[in-house]
Image: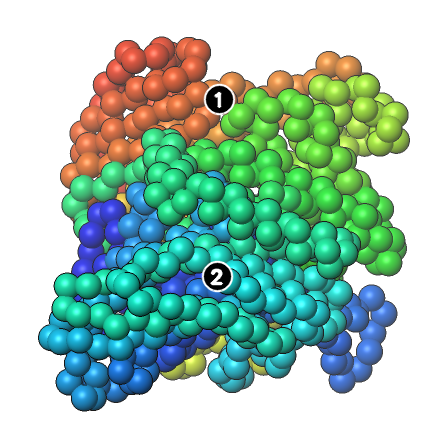
Amino acid sequence: MITHENFAPDPWQLRETALDLGVLAQSESVFAQSNGHLGWRGNLDEGEPHGLPGSYLNSVYASHPLPYAEAGYGYPESGQTTVNVTDGKVIRLLVDDHPFDLRYGELLSHERVLDFRTGVLSRSVEWTTPSGRTVRLTSHRMVSLAQRAVAVISYGVETVNGPATIAVQSELVANEQLPTTSGDPRMAAVIDSPLLPEEHYANGTRLRLIHSTATSGQRVAVAADHIVQGPDGTAWAAESEPDVARLTVTATLEPGQRLELVKFVAYGWSAERSLPAVRDQVEGGLAGARTTGWQGLVDAQRACLDEFWSCADVEVEGDEEVQQAVRFGLFHLYQASARGERRPIPAKGLTGTGYDGHAFWDTESFVLPVLTHTAPYTVASALAWRQSTLPRALERARQLGLEGATFPWRTINGAECSAYWPAGTVAFHVNADIAAAVERYVFSTGDREFQRGPGLDLLVHTARLWRSLGHFGADGVFHIDGVTGPDEYSAIARDNLYTNAMARRNLRAAADAVSLHPDRAPDLGVSAEEIADWRNTAARTAIPYNRRLGVHEQSAGFTDQEPWDFEATSEDQYPLLLHFPYFDLYRKQVVKQADLVLAMFTCPDEFSAEEKARNFAYYEPLTVRDSSLSACCQAVLAAETGHLRLAWAYTREAALMDLDDLEHNTRDGLHMASLAGTWIALVQGFGGLRRIRPAPPADPQDQPSGIAGPVEPDAAALFAPRLPSSLTRLAFNVRVQGRLIRLDMGQSTVRYTLLSGGPLTVTHHGTRVELTVDTPTDLPVPPAPDSPEPRQPKGRAPRT
C-alpha cells in the first residue's frame, strides 16, 4: 500500500489521494477503526463496491463442526468463526435518481485520511453523475474510544453545478453478502446468513435491529439515531424489515446549499441477557451518544489519544516510511485493546476475518509487551480474559491427562478450536507465554493486587502443567517430550528449547508470586513442597546444546537432522507449508519462524553474549520467515549481536508487513503481532530494552523451600541503545515499574530522562545509572561488535 502511487508516507496519518479498486480490500483493512469492543472496516460509506464488508463485535462468533477424516481422542469438536454483524456504517446516496457508485459516472477526486491523533477517518469526493450533475461529498467516521458501544458518522453533500434532488439512505444491514474465499488456510470460513432476526424497528429518525447468532446463541442489537440538517423542504421517512432498517432523507439542493446528516450507532450483545435487556442496552448507549453530540465525541476521542501518545509515541528520523508505520501500528494496537474489557485481542484485531477472528499466543508474546510499556491497563484487561477462561483450560488439561491448565492454541471463547492437532494439542508453550505476560505486566506496573488475584491464578495453574507434562530422566534432567514450539516446521519435538526455557521462567515466576502472597496459597492448594518442586524442576530443566558445534539446539537432536535443500527451492514455493508435506518439513533443518532466536530474546539470561552470536549465525541461514511473527524477533537479535544493517532490514519488513501487503493477505485484516513488531524492533532491538531475572543459584537446594521469603526480581530495566547508520535519531517513551522513561538516541550518545515517578536504577550497556525526575543523563553509545553478517536462505533475505 505505502508504495502504491495513491499513498504517501505521512508521520501522523494514512492518506489515500485517489481510489484504486484493485487495492480496495487492502485499504478497507488499513483504514479500519475499532475500540476493542466494536470494529468497522474501512468500507466506502455507500457500502459498494467493497472487498470485504465488515462490522465486528469482540467475541461474537458462529460455531461449526470440525470435520476429521479420522477421529481421534481429544480432538476439538467444533470451530469458531467471527461473524459480520449488523452493518451500521452504510449511507447510500442518490443524485437525481442516479445511485452514487464510483464505478459509474465520472470520479473527479477522491481522498481518504485516517488521522492517528484524532482517530477520525475523513473522506472527500467529487463525482459527476452520468447525466452531468456534479456533487461534493464529505464524511467523517469514528468508533468511539470513550463510549464503548458507540460509532458515529458525519455525512454531508452539496451540489456544484446546478440544482439536484438528493436522497440519502442511512441503513442498518444484517446478513450482508460476503465474497467467497480462496483455499488459503489463513482465510476465514464464510458462513452464510449467520444472524437470525428477532426484532426490527423504525420510527422518526430511529432505527433498530436485533438478531441472534444461528449457532452460538448470542444476541446482537444495533440501534441508530440521526440529526438531519438541510434546506427548507427537507423530509425523511423510516422503514424496517427483518434484515434492513432504513432512514431516507430527501432534499432539493441548489449550489451552495448542503444536506448534513449525523448518524449515531450503538452496538451491544450478550449470550445471557433477554431481548428487552439487550434492546435497552443499545438504546441507553444511543442516548448517551446523542447527549454528547458529534463534537463532544470527537473531543473525547482526541483526549484519549492524546493521553496514549504522551506515553507511547516513537520518533524516527531517517526513514519516513518507518516513522509512519510505527505510529500506524501503535494506533491500531491501541484501537484493538482500548475497550476490550475482559475480551481477547484477536490476531487480526477487529479489522477483518483472517484466522477466523481467533486469538493466539501472538497476543501475549507480541502485542502485550508493547501495551505493557505504553497502555498497561489494556494488558490487565486482556489477561483477565485469559483468567476468565481458566475453567475451560483446566477441563482441557484433564481431558489430556494433565495437571493444571492447558490453554488453547487458537480460540474465541476459551475452548480449543484448532483441528490441526500438532499445534492445537501440543503447542503447550502458550501456557508459558501467558505466564510471561503476567510476570512482565506486574514487574512493569507494580500492580500487586493483580498479581495476587488473576495473575496468581494464571501463574499457578500454568506452572502445574509442566510438572505433569515432563519427566526426570535417568540423567537427573527434567525433559519435556513431544511438543511443538513457535516453529511449526519442527513439530512434536523433544526438549524444544523455547518451551523449556519459558517453562523454567513460568515455574520460577509462580514460586515467587505465591511466596509474595502466602495468604492465597491455601485457596490454590499450593504447599511448601510444591513450591520447592517447582524451583527444583526449573533448575534441572533441559536446555539442549550441541558442544561439537558450540550452539544451542532448537530441540534435542535438531542440529543432527538433514538440512533443507534451499538451493532446490524456488521463490514461488514459499510459504513451504503450501507446497511441501509437513512430514518432510518436520524432519529437516528448516525453520518457519524465529524459535530459538525468540528464546534468546524472551529468556536472555539463559545465554551468554558469545552464545547468542553463535546461535544467531547458525539459525539465520535456516529461517525462511513463512510467518509475519519472525522479522521483528530476528531484528532484535541482529541488533543485539551487532548486525545493525540486517536488523534495520528486518525492522522495515516488520513495519511494512501490512502497509506493503508483503504476505498478500492484508485484505483479510491487519497482522496485530507484526504491527507490534515494529515497536519491538525499534525499542527492544535498537533501544535494547530488556528485563533480566537474577541468575538462579547453581544448586537448586539453595533455593527457598518454603512459601515465605520470595526471590525479589531485579529492580533495574536494562537498555543497550545502538542505532543503524540509516537513522540519525530514535526517541521513545516507555513505562517501567510505574515510571515513564524517555530515551533520545543519536549515533554516538543517548539521553535518558525520567519523566514521572520516583528515582529508578537502569543499566546502560551494563553500567548502572540512577535516574531522577527531569534530570537528563547523557551517555556515550559504544560501537557494535564487529563480526561477519550471517546469510539467509536463498531468496529469503529481508523484503525491503
Q: Amino acid at mark 1?
A: Gly
Above or below, comparing residue 20 to residue 547 in the picture = below
Q: Amino acid at mark 2?
A: Thr
Q: Residue at x 32, y 26 (%)?
A: 742
Extreme residue toward the left, this view = 161
The crowding category of the residue bearing disc 1, from other C-alpha atoms within 10 Å (few below 14, some 14 to 19, many at least 20), is: some
Which quadrant does the C terminus fall into? bottom left
- The residue nearer to you, when weighing 475 against 429, is 429
Task: Left or right? Give the position of 338 relative to 462.
Answer: left
Q: Nearer the viewer, mark 2 or mark 1?
A: 2
Q: Which residue is mark 2?
A: 205
Rendered location of residue 272, percent (x, y): 77, 54
- The residue nearer to you, when weighing 769 against 461, is 461
Are circles 2 and 1 on residues that touch, CB within 8 Å?
no
Rendered location of residue 426, percent (x, y): 71, 60
Q: In terms of secondary structure, where does tag 2 sit?
A: loop
**Quadrant housing residue 382:** top right
Above or below, comparing residue 303 to residue 172 in the picture = above
Can residue 265 be seen from the camera position used here?
A: yes
Task: Left or right? Give the position of 59 relative to 641.
Answer: right
Task: Left or right? Give the position of 644 relative to 172.
Answer: left
Q: Which residue is mark 1?
A: 738
Q: In terms of secondary structure, where does tag 1 sit?
A: loop
Q: Residue at x 56, y 67 (%)?
A: 202
